[in-house]
Every structure is written in structure tokens, then in C-alpha cells.
């Protein structure tokens, strides 16, 4: 049975031709030369002009945030802050279809994922932290923990709205004001969020959104009046930020890259495990910091697992992200596509066995067919470097000890998965894995109550849960 | 390697790359209950969170336009139109069979259903009404729905139905025996019933609501298939919990694995609680993406239902006319 096209409508996004910056409660009018174009990666068609925030713009935003903090927000009770957060959460829900289409157009991810995962989780984070705003005394950080002040927040392009929610919700709940810098290739959903923030009546300057490229982010990191920097992105850039912030008084949390190991034992529940491997690496086109990009499969079942996996990979529907039946969408940018291709070609050179889905890719847009490499060794680049695309490296192990050793043999430490029907073994392995997040018989499951973050070169600090408040309190 | 198409952005239509059949069909031999138990415990477990998540994701597939029309007609042709009430009479069965042959009085293009499903003592009458229409007569048997009778009585029940002209037998497994570990007995009964069936098709009802766990559903599926079932079926429709999407998924995965190891293609029938076309189409999606299009035929997939048929007709008409009609547009039975 083949499925006829079932496309969601573009007009629901209500895209504007151009977007200004959101500073001190107002949208600036973008000027012609201080703008860049954001594209739809599935078609390469331009979506809108977006303002390029200058150093002066960042300065204005920080000043607005500082004024809002000093005169309004630090005097707003927790219960009042809750109300704003609840209102924002409800508005996200009310405009969820619009947000989902905007997200899919700007990012390239399937509409099914923006609709069923990104937008609901974004609303959930606001709901969750709304509940904490008036209960900070009970968060385990002592009585009356104080906020840090002005938070500068830089987010990546892989989950644009969700990352904005992960940053803003706890920061606001804890009493901080914010300057948010969305990723260069995915500014639009944050700008719709700015409208929602306006609609919610949040006091001017409490949240400011300044779009732009890397230089805008750098200006924010370097601004002397920012108390806290929160960054999610690549380990390389995270390292640079840490260096720049090192001589200052700024607080810092980093959520960086990973090379997650999805460990499959011979007694794993077969069909669910195959789905879990697929979810682990092809969800969001593999643009996930915690992606299960290494499959460590017990050697005794490796052939059978690979056979089933390849069969399943071939069933993935790759194409128009706006089609409700699409499983895998477009790669976010030409630059990212080039990086994925480079590393994948190297994988063949290194001697791994490559299998690529026989899907047909569209001729326009940035596309990469789901790919699996078998016979990968720990010493291969494709086993060590984060590809950040729909490419899985399959390695084998013989014993649980070897699985743990191989899983830990990386400088990263963000996430791992363990697949077994034997609970005692799952717990034994989990205790020994060096990762911030460990999934048992599942993968890529998120919840605002559950703290997320890495160890070692995957960063430090947690987002979500009670632990997520620590990043925004002076404790 | 991938080919880059010059077509505009279009969705990939996934071909039937599901099942990889072996070159020859082999009938596995079950040596003893011990061997059967070992084989069953060697089967992979089912993670219920994962299975339910997979079913829920498949339920988000959107079937539109010609796919939807085709699927609605296919679903109609897969219905086993059922009446299994103590109060069933010749009159009731006549109505049912007439509807089975021509579901929509105003539209002869509507396909007839696959079969009519009745109790054994109404088989002869159903046969006489259906004649050579092509609609099969399926009979429940083996002390349906409980299965709580001796094997002798159960086999007599089967023979009665066959003598009366049944084309298909829907038997129930002994859940008491299964839950107390007497899998050999469960298996032997299926073999005996299949023997009695001869050329008639055997559907083995697992009564998944009483088996409760997905692991049990998987094991019972294998017992049924090893015993010679032509179809494995979810439920009698007479207990609280009937067919669910994850249950069907687990059964279809078992059917797929059985096909790959033996070459035999066993069908699946879902019954109980399927009332809307939306539900029915979701099942078809699960079939399509688990076992593939070779199972998208009444020879390998059935819906045991009664009120489902009118909803299928309603949706079919709506697709063609663009608007819904009142329920009374269709005959009640």
C-alpha cells in the first residue's frame, strides 16, 4: 500500500516577509542591509528576512533585560511569575499547529515530529517550571534562593523552539531576565514565541530575542553586564565560550555534543530494540546531541540485528517534511550536509561496510539518505567524531564488561541506551556508564521533570527537573 | 546507493520490502512439550512500552485520497460479518447474509464482505442464503467462547459445523491450559482441530484479553502457527478486552518471523471493539508496515466485526460525495 501525499498546509504558518528583533517588549523594524535570509532546507526556497543583531543591538537588549530585572522582575513574586509562565504555556498550545508548521519549514524536520514532540514538549517545559516559580524554597537550595540576574542564552538549530523553552522557562521561573540568541538557520519559531510572550503580557524587557549569526552570540557572551551564559551547541564552540568566560564572574552551563552508545544485548526485545535503534539515530535526522550514533551490539546476535535493521531502514519514508507520513526530513543546512558527507565518505575509506537506504531523494534541498556502517572499529573516525546526521556506526562486543569499556571509550558523555530483558544486567551496565542520561529499553525520551545534560566533553549543568533550577539560581 | 530524482518534492512510496521468505517452505516439527517450551522461552520478549509506542506512531499515518478509498474498499472486503448471540434466529442470519453479499443497497460497486461468522447450528441456513455468492461461511467452534469442554466435545462441535457446510472454523485455544503451562496440550488440540478441518480454513483464537501480556500473545501466536493455523485471531469479542493495535502488531511480527523461518504465510484476524473506519485503517497501516502488502488481502487479514461495516460504507460514501449522509441511509443489518 503506498500512501498518497498528505501535506500540511504552509499558510498555517502565517509567515511574514521579514522579522525584526524583539527588545524591550517591541519588535524593531528590520532594515534592508542588516538582514539575512532564512531558507527552507527542504526546498532551498527563502522563507523570510531576519534581522542581523549587531553589538549595539545586543547592548540594548542587555540593558532592557537589566532594567526589567532591577525595576520589575526581581520584585515580582514567584506566584506572579508562575502566572506568566502558565499563560505562555497555554498560548503555545493554542498556537501549536502554527508553531509546528513554522518549525518544520525553518528546520526541515518532519511535521509529525514538530507536531507530536517539539511543540508539546516546549509547552510542557513552561507548564513545569511555572509550577516551580513559587516553590523555590523547596527546591533543595536553601530558603529564598536568589536569581543570577540577566541570563544570555544561545541555542542551536536542531530543536529551535524546544531549546528556547528549555532555556527561558527555568530562567524566568527562578526570577532572571533573558536575552536569547536563536540559531542563525532557525530563527523563526523563536520570533513567533516572541509574539506569544507579548500576547502573554510579560513585562517589557524580561525576555529579549536577538537574532543573528555567530558574531551576535559572541557579543552576548562578551557583554560585561550579563550574569549568566547558557549555551547549547557544539563542543568546539562550547570550549571557546568557556575560555572567554573564564576570566569573568559569569556563571556558565554548557550542553554540548555526544557520540551516544546504544548497547544491545542478545536478550534485547527484538522488535522494540530495532525501533529504538532507529529512533536513536534517525529521529530528527540524527541532529540530536544525545543521538544513539554508535550501536554496540553483542557479537552473538550482530548478523541478525543488522539484517532486521537494514530492512527497517529501507522502510523509512524520506521526503517532504510537511507530509504527515514523512519519517525523515531534510538536513538543516548546506554546511551540515557537507560535514555529514565528508565524514561518511571517510567511513568508507576507513574500511567500514556501508549500507545506504534505497530511498529516492528530491533534487532540491539538503538531503542525506539514512546510512548504516557495519564492521566499524573504535579507532575509526566514524566511531569517535560526532557526525550529527542520519548515519549509524555499528560495532560489536562480546561481554558486558567490553560493552561498558567501549561505550565509555570517548571524551563525550551525554547519553547511552541499554537493551536487555534482564534487569540486573541493565542496572549493572548503567551504573558503570559515564553518561548524563541512560535509557533502558528505549531511546530519545524526554520529559521536563527529568534532568538532561552531560559529563566530560558533553558539558556540565542540567536542564529539566529540580536540578534545572540550579543553573539559574545564585547557589 | 541513492538515486537523486528530478521530480518535485514528493513522498517516497515504500515498496514491500518487509518479509524475506526462504527458498523452500519447511513445516517445523514439534517433538515434545519440553521442546516446545524451550522454543517458546527462546522467543524474544516484547517490551510493552516500546510496542505501544510503535503502534501509536503507526496510528499517526494519514491516509488520504485514492489511498483512503482503496483502503476502505479493501477493509470492506476483509470483514467477517458476525452475529454470535444466544438469540440468533434464521431471520437474523438471513438479514446478515444478505447484507454481507450487498452491503450497500444503493451501490452495487461496493465489494461484498469476506465471510459471515455464526454459531455452528446456523451454518446450514447461512450456507443456503449465501449460495455461490463467494462470501464464505465461518463458524465458531470448540465450545466457543470459553473453550471449557473436553477435546471430544470440541471436535464434535467442529465436525458439526463442517458437515453443515462451513468453509472456515474459528476455534478457541484452551487458555486455562496455556496459563498453567500445559502448552503441549494447547498445541495438540490445535493439531487435532486442523486435522478435523481438512480443506477448511482454521482460525485460531488466542483470546489475547485473557492472555494479558504481550509475551503471552507472542508465544500463543507461535503455538497457533506451529499447530497449523491458517489464521491467528485476537479475540472472541465476548470478554472485556478485545483487539488492540499493539496486540495486532505483536501478532503480525510473529507472523512475519514465522514466514521468514518456514515460508508459510499465516493470516491475522482482529476482532472485537473495532467500530470505526479510522480504527480499521490503522490496522491496515500496521499490516502494511509490519508484514507488507502480501498480507493486504482477505486471504491474509480479516476484521471480525458487525457495526464496523456501516461506518466503512459511511466513510466510503463521504469520500465520493464530499459530505456525510444520515446513518439511516444504510441498512441496520
Image (cartoon, helix red, strand yellow):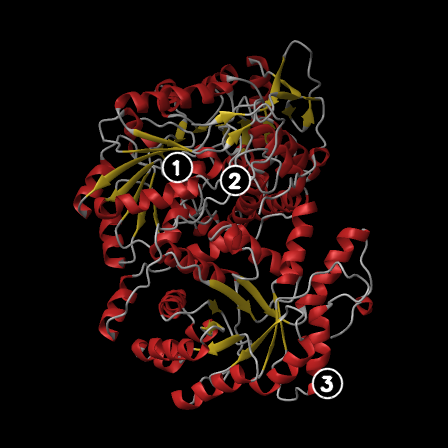
Q: Which sits in the foreground, B125 or A266? A: B125
Labels 3 and 1 share a subunit: no
**Side (left or right) of A263 relative to A369:** left
**Side (left or right) of A449 relative to A308:** right
Asked if labels 2 and 1 touch by Cβ distance under 8 angstroms, the answer is no
Residue farthest top in this picture: A33
Subunit ID for the residue under disc 1: A
Q: Which sits in the foreground, B286 or A64? A: B286
Residue B254: image quadrant is: bottom left
Q: Is residue B321 above or below residue B82?
A: above
**Side (left or right) of A448 relative to B316:** left
> How busy is the neighbourhood of tag 2: few (under 14 within 10 Å), some, or many (20 plus)?
many
Q: Earlier in the sequence, mark 1 or mark 2?
A: 1
Numbered circle sitting on residue B91: 3
Q: Which residue is mark 2?
A: A327
Question: Which part of the image, by quadrant, shows the N terminus of chain B?
Answer: top left
Q: Which residue is mark 1?
A: A291
**Cα distance, mark 1 to mark 2?**
16 Å
Amino acid at each position: 500500500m503506498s500512501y498518497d501525499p498528505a501535506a500540511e498546509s504552509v499558510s498555517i504558518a502565517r509567515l511574514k516577509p521579514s522579522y525584526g528583533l524583539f527588545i524591550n517588549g517591541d519588535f524593531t523594524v528590520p532594515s534592508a542591509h542588516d538582514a539575512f535570509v532564512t531558507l527552507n532546507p527542504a526546498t532551498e526556497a527563502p522563507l523570510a528576512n531576519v534581522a542581523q543583531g549587531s553589538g549595539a543591538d545586543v547592548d540594548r537588549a542587555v540593558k532592557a533585560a537589566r532594567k526589567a530585572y532591577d525595576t520589575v522582575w526581581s520584585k515580582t513574586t514567584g506566584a506572579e511569575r508562575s502566572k506568566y509562565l502558565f499563560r505562555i504555556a497555554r498560548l503555545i498550545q493554542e498556537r501549536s499547529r502554527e508553531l509546528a508548521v513554522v518549525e518544520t519549514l525553518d528546520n526541515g524536520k518532519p511535521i509529525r515530529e514538530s507536531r507530536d514532540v517539539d511543540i508539546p514538549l516546549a509547552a510542557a517545559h513552561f507548564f513545569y517550571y511555572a509550577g516551580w516559580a513559587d516553590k523555590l524554597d523547596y527546591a533543595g537550595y536553601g530558603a529564598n534562593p536568589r536569581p543570577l540576574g540577566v541570563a544570555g542564552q544561545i541555542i542551536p538549530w536542531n530543536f529551535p523552539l524546544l531549546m528556547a523553552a528549555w532555556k527561558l522557562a527555568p530562567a524566568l521561573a527562578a526570577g532572571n531576565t533573558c536575552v536569547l540568541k536563536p540559531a542563525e538557520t532557525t530563527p523563526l519559531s523563536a520570533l513567533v514565541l516572541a509574539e506569544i510572550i507579548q500576547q502573554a503580557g510579560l513585562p517589557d524587557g524580561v525576555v529579549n530575542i536577538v537574532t543573528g549569526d555567530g558574531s551576535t552570540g559572541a557579543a552576548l557572551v562578551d557583554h560585561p553586564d550579563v550574569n549568566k551564559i547558557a549555551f547549547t551547541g557544539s563542543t568546539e564552540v562550547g570550549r571557546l565560550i568557556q575560555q572567554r568566560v573564564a576570566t569573568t564572574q559569569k556563571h556558565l552551563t554548557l550542553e554540548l555534543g555526544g557520540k551516544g552508545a546504544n548497547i544491545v544485548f542478545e536478550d534485547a526485545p527484538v522488535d522494540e530494540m530495532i525501533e529504538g535503534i532507529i529512533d536513536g539515530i534517525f529521529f530528527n535526522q540524527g541532529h540530536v546531541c544525545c543521538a544513539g550514533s554508535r550501536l554496540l551490539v553483542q557479537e552473538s546476535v550482530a548478523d541478525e540485528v543488522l539484517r532486521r535493521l537494514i530492512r527497517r531502514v529501507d522502510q523509512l519514508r524520506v521526503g517532504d517534511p510537511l507530509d504527515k507520513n514523512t519519517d525523515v526530513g531534510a538536513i538543516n543546512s548546506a554546511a551540515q550536509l557537507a560535514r555529514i558527507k565528508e565524514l561518511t565518505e571517510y567511513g568508507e575509506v576507513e574500511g567500514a561496510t556501508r549500507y545506504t537506504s534505497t530511498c529516492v531523494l528530491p533534487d532540491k534541498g539538503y538531503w542525506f539518505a539514512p546510512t548504516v556502517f557495519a564492521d566499524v572499529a573504535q579507532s575509526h573516525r566514524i566511531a569517535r567524531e560526532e557526525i550529527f546526521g542520519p548515519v549509524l556506526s555499528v560495532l560489536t562486543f562480546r561481554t558486558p564488561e567490553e560493552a561498558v569499556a567501549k561505550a565509555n571509550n570517548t571524551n563525550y558523555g551525554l547519553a547511552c541506551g541499554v537493551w536487555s530483558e534482564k534487569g540486573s544486567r541493565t542496572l549493572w551496565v548503567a551504573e558503570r556508564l559515564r553518561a548524563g542520561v541512560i535509557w533502558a529499553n528505549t531511546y530519545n525520551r524526554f520529559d521536563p521533570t527529568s534532568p538532561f545534560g552531560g559529563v566530560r566533553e558533553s558539558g556540565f549543568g542540567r536542564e529539566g527537573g529540580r536540578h534545572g533550577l540550579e543553573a539559574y539560581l545564585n547557589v | 546507493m541513492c538515486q537523486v530524482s528530478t521530480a518535485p518534492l514528493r513522498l517516497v512510496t515504500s515498496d514491500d520490502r518487509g518479509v524475506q521468505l526462504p527458498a523452500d517452505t519447511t513445516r517445523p516439527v514439534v517433538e515434545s512439550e519440553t521442546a516446545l517450551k524451550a522454543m517458546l522461552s527462546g522467543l524474544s520478549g516484547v517490551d510493552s512500552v516500546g510496542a505501544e509506542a510503535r503502534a501509536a506512531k503507526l496510528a499517526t499515518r494519514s491516509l488520504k485520497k485514492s489511498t483512503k478509498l482503496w483502503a476502505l474498499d479493501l477493509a470492506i472486503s476483509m470483514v467477517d460479518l458476525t452475529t454470535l448471540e444466544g438469540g440468533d434466529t434464521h431471520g437474523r442470519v438471513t438479514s446478515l447474509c444478505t447484507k454481507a453479499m450487498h452491503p450497500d443497497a444503493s451501490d452495487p460497486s461496493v465489494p461484498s464482505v469476506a465471510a459471515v461468522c455464526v454459531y455452528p447450528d446456523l451454518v446450514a441456513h447461512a450456507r443456503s442464503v449465501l449460495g455461490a455468492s463467494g462470501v464464505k461461511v465461518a463458524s465458531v467452534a470448540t465450545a466457543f467462547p470459553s473453550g471449557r469442554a473436553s477435546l471430544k466435545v470440541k471436535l464434535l462441535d467442529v465436525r458439526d459445523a463442517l458437515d453443515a457446510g462451513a468453509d472456515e472454523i474459528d476455534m478457541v485455544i484452551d487458555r486455562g491450559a496455556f496459563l498453567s503451562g500445559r502448552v503441549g496440550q494447547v498445541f495438540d488440540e490445535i493439531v487435532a482441530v486442523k486435522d478435523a478441518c481438512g480443506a477448511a480454513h482454521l482460525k485460531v483464537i488466542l483470546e489475547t484479553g485473557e492472555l494479558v501480556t504481550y509475551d503471552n500473545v507472542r508465544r500463543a501466536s507461535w503455538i497457533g502457527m506451529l499447530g497449523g493455523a491458517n489464521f491467528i485471531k485476537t479475540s472472541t469479542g465476548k470478554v472485556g478486552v478485545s483487539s488492540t493495535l499493539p496486540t495486532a502488531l505483536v501478532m503480525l511480527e510473529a507472523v512475519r518471523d514465522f514466514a521468514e523461518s518456514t515460508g508459510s504465510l499465516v493470516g491475522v484476524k482482529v476482532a472485537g471493539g473495532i467500530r470505526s473506519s479510522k480504527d480499521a485503517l490503522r490496522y491496515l497501516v500496521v499490516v502494511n508496515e509490519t508484514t507488507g502488502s502480501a498480507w493486504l488481502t482477505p486471504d491474509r487479514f480479516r476484521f471480525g466485526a458487525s457495526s464496523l461495516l456501516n461506518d466503512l460504507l459511511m466513510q466510503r460514501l463521504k469520500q465520493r460525495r464530499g459530505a456525510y449522509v444520515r446513518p439511516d441511509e444504510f441498512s441496520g443489518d
